[in-house]
Image: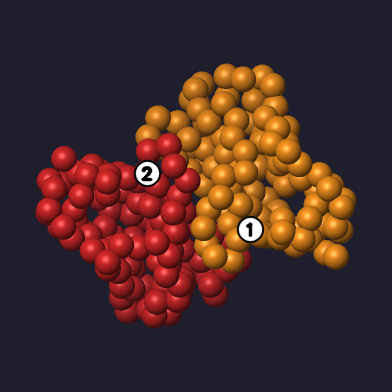
Amino acid sequence: AAGVIQSPRHLIKEKRETATLKCYPIPRHDTVYWYQQGPGQDPQFLISFYEKMQSDKGSIPDRFSAQQFSDYHSELNMSSLELGDSALYFCASSFLGREKLFFGSGTQLSVL
Amino acid sequence: AQTVTQSQPEMSVQEAETVTLSCTYDTSESNYYLFWYKQPPSRQMILVIRQEAYKQQNATENRFSVNFQKAAKSFSLKISDSQLGDTAMYFCAFMSGNQFYFGTGTSLTVIP
């Protein structure tokens, strides 16, 4: 069965650069969530989208933006990267906003 | 590939009663960690309890305890003396190296 696809799996950037993370939800899922998990930390909720509209906002920095496209995939754009942005970024998807949440394998971002 | 399975999408329990949430996983790794996270409506992920695979003793954290059966690859969460504030989604998660995998969640409702 198709799962949540995140790309790239690994990303290395320099400080002050820009990064774009992509998330492809399970087909027919209409809700996407983004989480950031720093080393040894709990996953932190960043933002979510339902039917291409932002539905919830968590601790997403102003340097980050995200959107959900017409095909329901989502992109997390991160600008002016800082060392502290190094983390595992998870995307999850669900149908009708809740019920089961399916997580992707994450994108490991390293900022040097 | 690692997988985490939570076979109970929804559960309910009377206040002050005990409830057990199931989680099974599949891995060929010998060193890994298992977690239970609580997700309230705020979407945050709150660590409930953590278990190192090399430890035979089941982890306990106040009213929360786990039944870790390594051979059976089972990691259930027992909540004793359930409280209304325990109402949330609960996610089982597996970590080995840099890889992190979540189950699909169990929605727990504590009934007054």
Left or right of B6 on screen, residue B93: left
Q: Tell which subunit mark 2 falls on.
A: A
Q: Nearer the viewer, residue A24 or B89?
A: B89
Name the image quarter holding the C terminus of chain A: top left
Name the secondary structure under disc 2: loop
Identify the residue shown where x is 20% and y is 50%. A82
Left or right of A44 on screen, residue A77: left
Q: Are marks 1 and 2 on the same chain?
A: no
Name the secondary structure under disc 1: strand
Kindly identify the amino acid type of the residue bearing the numbered disc 1.
Met
Q: Nearer the viewer, residue B92 or A45?
A: A45
Task: State which chain is coloured orange.
Answer: B
Q: Tell which subunit mark 1 falls on.
A: B
Q: Percent x, y for residue A103?
A: 46, 54
Q: Is residue B87 above or below residue B38?
A: below
Which residue is under mark 2? A38
Which residue is under mark 1? B89
Q: Quadrant of residue A6?
A: bottom left
Q: Nearer the viewer, residue A24 or A52?
A: A52
Left or right of A9 on screen, residue A37: right
Task: State which chain is coloured red.
Answer: A
- Separation of disc 1 and disc 2 at Cα? 22 Å
Is residue A112 visible in this depiction of the protein?
A: yes
Q: Nearer the viewer, residue A64 or B72?
A: A64
Identify the residue shown where x is 26% and y is 57%. A21
Which color scheme is applied? by chain
Identify the residue shown where x is 35% and y is 63%. A60
Q: Percent x, y for residue A90?
A: 39, 53
